[in-house]
Amino acid sequence: MTVDENRVGDAAEMASARLMLDQYGCEICSNYYISNCLIEAIKAKLRNSNVHIIMRKVHGGLIPHFLWRDESGLIYDFGTDHSILTPLMYRGYLRRRREHD
């Protein structure tokens, strides 16, 4: 292995070490902020018309959860720590994962 290959390996290890995962194993892509999953899915669709919005029923919940998939097959959503500010606004963060997760 050359010196340059060592640097590339070290850089990849450092990048993966900085990867933050939530309690479900999804990559955290943002800091905490106030929003909800539908607002974030609509914002993603407005930024990129190729985004596909997915609606999922939540077990035991009346309000569905919205996710979105981009062209690369990554699934994004707005995850929360269950800190409800109002009935439809949450303190949370963007997260992403591969489609098969």
Image: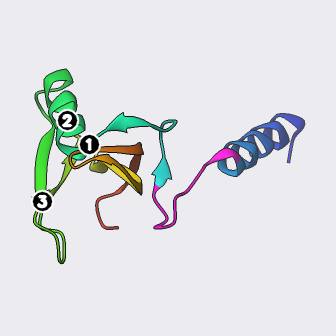
Q: Residue at x 37, y 35 (%)?
A: 34
Residue sitting at the far bottom: 60
The residue nearer to you, when weighing 18 against 77, is 77
Identify the residue under disc 3: 63
Q: Is residue 11 left or right of residue 19?
A: right
The image quadrant that residue 56 belongs to is bottom left
Can you identify the residue that label 1 sits on?
36
SS under mark 1: loop
Name the amino acid type tagged 1: Asn
Image marks 1 and 2: residues in contact by CB distance under 8 Å:
yes
The total number of labels drawn is 3
Check if residue 25 falls in the magenta segment. Answer: yes
Is residue 98 left or right of 9 when viewed as pictured? left
Mark 3 neighbour density, 10 Å: few (under 14) some (14–19) many (20 or more): few
Q: Position of residue 89 (x, y in %)?
A: 27, 42
Circle 1 residues within 10 Å: few <14, some 14–19, many ≥20? many
Left or right: 21, with 53 as reference point: right
The reply to whether the magenta stretch includes residue 86 is no
Q: Residue at (75%, 39%) from the top-left corner? A: 11
Residue type, mark 2 in image = Ile
Residue drawn 61% across the image and 48% down it = 19
